[in-house]
Amino acid sequence: MTATSENLSMVETPGVAWRKQIRFALIGALSSAFIALAGMPVGLDGRSIIQPVLSMGFLSLLWVPFVLATIAGSEVVLEGMTARTRDSKDLLAGGIVGLGSAGGLVLLMVLIQNFNLRDPLVNWSPQLLNLLSFNRSLAVGGLLWVLLGLILGVFGGAMHVLPKKLCSRIRTVVLSVFAVSVLETFLTDLLEGFRLEVLTDFVYYKRGGLEVGGALLVAALALLIPLLVGTRIRDVKKQVVDLPAEERKRVNLILLAVSAALLLVLPFFLGKIANELLANVGLFVLLALGLNVVVGLAGILDLGYVAFFAVGGYTTAVLTSPNSPGFSPELPWPIALIVVVVLTGIVGLFIGAPVIRMRGDYLAIVTLGFGEIIRLLFLSDWLSGWFGGAQGITNIPGVDVGIGTVKGTDPRSVFLLVLVFCAIAIYVSWRLENSRLGRAWMAIREDEDVAEAMGVNTTNTKLMAFVVGAVLASFSGAIFSAKVGSIFPTSFLMLVSIIILVVVIVGGMGNIAGVIVGALVLIGVLGGPKQPGLLQEFSQFKLLIYGALLVWMMLKRPEGLVPNVRRTRELHQDEFLQDAWLKGEIDTGDQEELS
Amino acid sequence: MNNPAVPLLELRDVNTHYGAVHILKDVDLAIYPGELVCLLGGNASGKSTTLKTLLGMVTPTTGEVVLDGEVVTHQSTSYRVERGATMVPENRRLFKRLSVRENLELGAYLRTDRDGIANDLERIFELFPRVKERINQKSGTLSGGEQQMVAMGRALMSNPRVLLMDEPSMGLAPALVQANFELIQQIHEEGVAIFMVEQNANMALSIADRGWVLQTGRVVLDDSAEALLANPDLRASYLGEAGQG
């Protein structure tokens, strides 16, 4: 066995896979044309990344040749083989992919010039043609795209030829400039809080986007900072990891305390926009944490989760608003919250009881139905005497917390309130995950019948998942009610359920940190169902991007953005065992199926 | 070795239906403490249903299930697990994405005695040293033989008095089947009564004390293992068609 693996190591992986390059060139052509026809270049042209050189509209096309060429050029080095040395052929391969992507656009431009397909394709417009041809003639525009595609494609291919370190530097610089530009509203807001407007004034153009000088500054910083502190951070990290378990625990606790304190102070340095944004993210973190218990831990695919958000929101509205049409006790929010939690828990039991008898796809469809039923009940004329029908309930007071009132006009207070509830939800989720109940949930997720045979009471355990999920959603609903000040059935569309599910999936199912990252990225940057994110211009493409992201995640990274620590460790262990097996160090003793 | 006074687990005149279909017909069987017994039968003879009825995953239409002298016909599975009955499911069915340790911990789900659990974990490590090596590995990545060990370990973690095994040799390579039966004997020697549902009649009867043969839901033979092995009816009706499995 050792002999073969030595022989293998002399075998180089085969050269450039040309068919793959051609395939990716075609994918590039289709993607570019699709993006152009979806209206992204025109729709996003108003948002500039680097003024006046690059707008988000052009970026929506320019990433295609580069990224596809990089992907097309990546090769899996089979175990035991050595990676081949990359050469100019890889640059050529990248160029082909780039040319293909540009070719799709050129073809589109020619077609737009000569035919009119505006009827089914709304973006088939002279405006798009002007934009694509840089306001010049078709020939000049086409030539420019071919050149751009070629350069970017070669550059993408070069990511495999250039030394690794240089590539990662380039990546850092490009991503930093992009991130600083995307985070403009947030950073301006933050720096204003620290009275550092000078800095933002220098970096950003007045009407959005980075100045060229600003972009250069950011790029320089992105290059220099890793050089200065890169190794030091790694050293400190290593020191901490090497500490004995008890001291490491203390260090972790201190870090936790410091970051908690920072989070609590942060809202006071943020302006309205940033606080509002983070409050929205927090509301979705609460919802996603709840759904994470149901879907991620217990494995119950609930597509009607918005129902509990709605019940929480409406109950709060009825109990606190003086305008509540049927029953209006005008309770203070904290007392109302207790009723809300109890009531939503009961609704969780009622919806859960019939639902958990089903499994798999049937369950998903039934929950979808319940989600809609709850919304339609709030909308119905039958119950409009209680919930106001389509007019909803208005004039919901804020939360009186003694020192002040938390209401929508003061996003800072909302964010602080959300933060407190997020902390509670995170603690609860964390404790549950490692509890006996959490283990029972995971057992049910893996194999319900066997879980039952182990003595898990599957009915009660699944109901508990529903109730915990419902209660966490009701927190979010109660805060949402007080924040917005009015509540309508349209706030609780099915789309909300889907978006919460996407947040959970993209972040990493069954993983608390993943859920938070997922909410930050999706809700914070792209925006929620009705809440604008940092990229407000994206709102019309939000669902397209959500969908694309979901497909990509399911194909390439099913474990989510932040994979479970345990799962990663196990994956590494698999690799280790496989290596050992290849070297013949482990005798598995049996050759039958390794299911 | 047998204590004929009180059966540990017993079916009394049980009839079971799935929908309108009559599966088990007047089944009577008793498992005594410390016994190793097997239930034989061809496909669709009602073997698995018998096992599910014993553990409460299927409720009989008429008749009684008795666990340690107590009628538990309408008690839940977890009630029966708590009182000393557990099963090793067909095809092992581990919680594949959970680690070996988590699988074992779930076996002890209903127990609260931490010391006892820790002791039993050590006992399982002694019984299956291979399991200890793989304790943090995801159980779905184990080989078939190792999975069988974890499945048995998981069942033993509930500290059972009677272990119900559904087709323990199914899906195992022929070389492993023998080793697997040796493991079952080993567990049996620790004093756990074992009720085994098997298609591999020769192998099962070679280690069992007694056995039943089930045919379309009815117990047609009930005898000691030696007698069953020698019985020409068994050879004709069952071994003849199912062969060595």
Image (cartoon, helix red, strand yellow):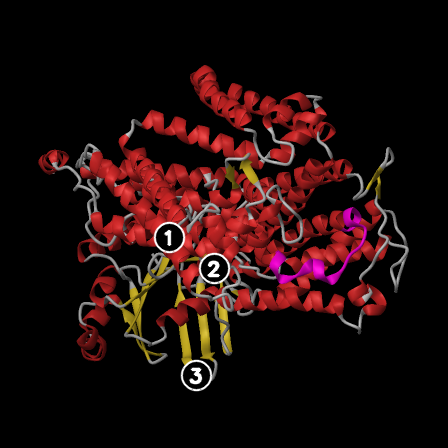
Q: Nearer the viewer, residue A13 or B102?
A: A13
Residue at the image position 77 percent from the left and 49 percent from the top? A484
Image: B139 above or below B181: above
Q: Secondary structure at mark 1?
A: helix
Q: Which mark is residue A127?
A: none
Residue range of the region highlighted in magenta in the rendering: A481-496
Q: Nearer the viewer, residue A438 or B50?
A: A438
Q: Are marks 3 and 1 in contact (CB under 8 Å)?
A: no
Task: Identify the subunit bearing mark 3.
Answer: B
Residue at the image position 71 percent from the left and 52 percent from the top? A474
Q: Which residue is mark 2?
A: A448
CA neighbours of label 2 inside 10 A, class few (<14), some (14 to 19), many (20+)? many
Q: Nearer the viewer, residue A391 or A235?
A: A391
The answer to whether dots 3 and 1 both sit on one chain is: no
Task: Identify the subunit bearing mark 1.
Answer: A
Main secondary structure of the magenta stretch: helix
Residue A43 in view:
yes
Task: Identify the subunit bearing mark 2.
Answer: A
CA neighbours of label 3 inside 10 A, class few (<14), some (14 to 19), many (20+)? few
Q: State the image quarter where residue B21 is shown.
A: bottom left
Identified by mark 2, the residue type is Glu
Identified by mark 3, the residue type is Val
Q: Which residue is mark 3?
A: B21
Q: CA distance from mark 1 to mark 2?
A: 55 Å
Q: Are marks 2 and 3 in contact (CB under 8 Å)?
A: no
